[in-house]
Amino acid sequence: IKAVSGKVKNTVGSGDSMVAGFIAGYIKTNDYKYALELGSAAGSATAFSDDLGTYDEIMENLKKIQNPH
């Protein structure tokens, strides 16, 4: 999948956020593609913020991943 563009502020926790998003996405849909999209959205949301990414930031990134234009 395509990565979301943004300014990286802090990578601490972004890998854990990616894994959490992937697991949540897979549990919700049983679809690996959606799980990877949600994981990428969650990991990048955390990397682009000073703290953990919020639900709203994750969903905004997910929209960008699913509809890149």
Image: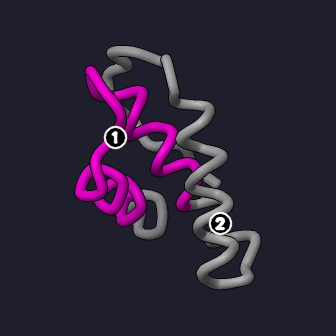
* Predominant SS of the magenta segment: helix
Q: Earlier in the sequence, mark 1 or mark 2?
A: 2
Disc number placed over residue 53 in the picture, else none? 1
Q: From this view, report whether residue 57 is shown above or below residue 63.
A: above
Spatial CA span between label 1 and label 2: 17 Å
Res 31 → quadrant: bottom right
- Residue 32 position, x and y percent, is 76, 71
Give the magenta-colored segment's residue range. Answer: 38-64
Near-viewer residue (22 or 66):
22
Q: Is residue 69 left or right of residue 41?
A: left
Read off the residue under disc 2.
35
User: Which structural element holds mark 1?
Assistant: loop
- Residue 63 position, x and y percent, is 36, 65
Residue at the (48%, 18%) spot, across then down: 11
Does the CB distance between marks 1 and 2 fall below 8 Å?
no
User: Which structural element holds mark 2?
Assistant: helix
Q: Is residue 63 magenta?
A: yes
